[in-house]
Image (cartoon, coloured by chain):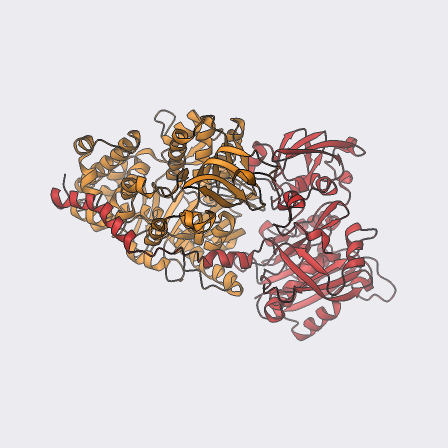
Amino acid sequence: MEVYGKDKDLNAFFGLVSERQERVKRASPLPDMEDPISDLSRMLHPEGMRLVVSVVRDETPSVKTFRLEPAAGSGAGLPVFRPGQYVSLKTKIGDAWITRPYSISSSPSDVLSSGYYELTIQKKEGGFFTGHIWDLWKEGTVVDLSGPHGNFYHDSLRDSYDIVAIAGGSGITPIRSMVREIFAGDLDAKITLLYGIRTPDCAVFSEEFDMYAAREPERFRVIYVCSEPDDTWRGPAGFITASCIMEHAGDVKGKTFFVCGPREMYGFLDRELNALDIPRRRIRKEASGEPVDIASEPEFPVETKEMTFSLVVHMGNEARTISAKAVDTILVSLEKAGIGPDSQCRSGECGLCRSLLMAGDVFVRPDGDGRRTADKKFGYIHPCSSYPVSDLEIRIPLTGDVVTAKNGNSSWNSDGGTTI
Amino acid sequence: MNENIKNNPHFDSYYDAVVIGAGNGGLSAALQLSIDNVRVLLLEQHNLPGGFATSFVRGRFEFEPSLHELSNVGSGQDKGFMRKFLQDKGGVDVEFIPVPEAYHLILTDEGINIKIPFGIEKFIETIAAAVPGSREPLERYMQTCKETFGAIGYIGRMNGVPDPKVLMEEYPSFMVTAGYTVKQVTDTFGIPDRALEMIYPYWSYLGIPVNRLSFTIWALVLYNYILKGAHIPRYTSHGMSAAIDARIRELGGRTEYSTRVKKIFVEEGRVVGVETAAGERIGASYVIANLSPNIVYGSLVDDRNNVPEEAYRLINARKIGASAFVVYLGLDASPDELGIESYGYFIGASMDTEKSYKNFFTFEAPEMQATICLNRAIPDCSPPGTTILSMTALAGPDTWKDVRPENYVRFKQEFAKVMIDQFSEAVGAPLSDHIEEIEIATPQTFARYTGAFKGSIYAYEQDPWDSVVARSMSGPQERYIKGLDFAGGYASIGHGYESAFLSGRIAAQMALKKIKR
């Protein structure tokens, strides 16, 4: 066998190394670390952001909007996001970590034109975290949060141009982001919004919505559906039922539904949407977060309801034993003990808190089981949607704060707790 | 170094070997080291093992992000390297599922629509039946490829130090072809052009055009796939990565995730330890890096004075290989309903590898796609009545560099639409009416999750002078720091799942010799 004659062929073979050496000799001796691809990746998905509250706006007696901007002189721009995405707040109150995801209620266009995010937060009755925010977040407060995340957004390749949005309570925030983006000209879609409110005075953003609806009724319509109307209420009353949807959104065929609201609303709406025979791909539902009352979920092992278990937590060579209530997610128990592993969605979906279950049994909330198939096989859990049903032993990934609590600053959440 | 080993509550103060990066190469190295009872610590910046060999969940779908065809698994009777290493030697709990055909090639301008089977004889027969006059040259061609395949196996068995006489006598075409490109060698066989178009699709697994690609690596890849067939792991690549991680721990190795290595310490030309991003210092007498030398020499080695100038010259002489643009679809109809009959498609206008390669660098919508319908290998990988499809195009590592954050989504959507339409037209599958989930990965996405330099998935390009052959012959001179070795795509064998596993095992075996215990 020869290709171009044996001598030539073997010269080519033995010439490989000398050609290589020639090329190496000619090349620059200076390290070139420029990597614009990773740079853009970090711009789009920063590990964390430190922002300052610039404006606080009262929306209703129990709802405030906080405008957040990069600290003066920080030089960092805010990442753009897709309307409907959320950020995760993480803070230490006393010895406990608290993490909460909040949809960004402003739009990506607001980032580009004015450089801010807005979070619109409803104060929960007796709520520990929202109470804390109400008391402490003022103009100038420094806030640490994650980069934007989440899959609740309109995708032109998947979703219809014609959107029916169904929002309940504070589930309005991602929808507001979408509406603003439509009117900024950067989201090519139209929206019919069915906005479920408890009482007439608790609609948030109604002035803005009414203004947009008046400006371009063919792009945006809003129907407030009030479940506890008073005598003056003229709009539709009750819950958002199949017939209510048909009446106000018209023929559902070919439309994409975006649904965001409290968990209780989902159970109800699932049945109503089912009755309308909408294909699954046409319904986008935002993750609902942790249930307020897990013990009332049908599959929950109710006999454990009052119990507290012992939880051995391995982090590298360290191990700690903490207590874990049956009705708290394992993530919450970790946070209460001052261990704040990375987490984002708190709904079982994103998998960031993925941990190894070494011993014991857990209850995994069935509608929050976003685990990979192999992870189920090899004993992994997502602590944000898992509850102990026995004493447990788990191994969690190391997080910056675990170490930096002792060693000082190195990761974004390492000193987040001291600033708000 | 020793006085610095403190403040590391999470680790022992010393390990025989630290492996940086739990990609296929790192997992493989750590597995081999733990089989050999070496005290090994595997550190990974992401919260999952696998690197590119992972999975992600959207709605009711779990997607395979990167793997198309895993080579050299072999059957239960005729085991290939992957099966022997992972299952037999490693005791890893992974199941391999065979892929039904080599590829389904659709070239719209050429009127080619042909399914190419595995098996050397069937491969030749299928192409010969489609292109008269191609049987005889193809038979000679595959024989040449076979000798290269055999030669590389022999060199491996000789631990990289072959007897030149044996090489010349038993694998005569190896040395006479190793200095050339694919085109230089292939053109001399007189294979009809139409048949060439049918055998070239796997070039896209290598990522540089046939007029530059080393013949050796090409012959190896082509022959390996056609001879041994291809497989994919049950439960996606994450099923394999999670299984290996579990086995390493079972064997007494230590793995830790969400832990980025920030520094490699070198003293007097020898590795002495690493430091994590959280500031924990860990002593080690050997470090295996499953990442790019650009990052290792450019920013990890603690003091650049510890890196000889030669190392930077070598990096700069080489060319970083392709990244990818991938569209993942979860569809609400079965493959039968959609008319998707095959597992792996290569679709384009024609098989012009130079033109396609140029297209990688122009930041225009991709012209070629390699598309996988996972359900055609594993029917129950998604719920009944659904389909998982992933469409891959290569992208030059720098082509996405000028994209601004505000335009990023728009470009993703535009390019994805072109690929979806191309597939729909070529195959006759109405994809747009059935998209339940869609995710789009760009070079930025790969950089984000794996830390890959410039988002490259193919490491350094394999021109003849930087082919596995040239790298192996230069190996000893290019080890710049004692106790520091590479595994994965950037090691000498190059990218690809099997190569990464091989490289990890080789690095581990080298380490074993050097570690004083």
Q: Residue furthest right?
A: A231
Q: Position of residue A147 (x, y in %)?
A: 61, 56
Chain for colour red = A
Whether residue B178 sits left or right of residue B62 in the image: it is left
Between A117 and B250, the one lying in front of the other is: B250
* Res B352 visible: no
Residue B365, quarter of picture: bottom left
Q: Where is residue A117 in the image (x, y as percent from the top left)?
A: 66, 63
Q: B345 left or right of A89? A: left
Judge whether A32 appears above or below A385 on screen: below
Who's the residue at 53% across and 27% down the image? Answer: B252
- How many numbered discs sit on the rendered protein? 0
Residue B494 shows in this picture: yes
Q: Which residue is drawn at 55% across and 34% down?
A: B13
Which quadrant is home to the C terminus of chain B?
top left
Which chain can be seen in orange?
A: B
Q: Is residue A168 above or below residue B450?
A: below
B228, B260: nearer the viewer: B260
Using the image, determine if residue A321 lies above or below residue A89. above
Judged from this view, the residue extending furthest toward the bottom is A215
Task: Provide residue A287's location: percent of width, then percent of height.
Answer: 66, 49
Whole-percent x, y for residue B157 in the image: 30, 29
At 44% from the left edge and 61% from the top edge, which residue is drawn? B401
- Residue A369 position (above or below residue A253): above
Question: Nearest the camera: B266 or B44?
Answer: B266
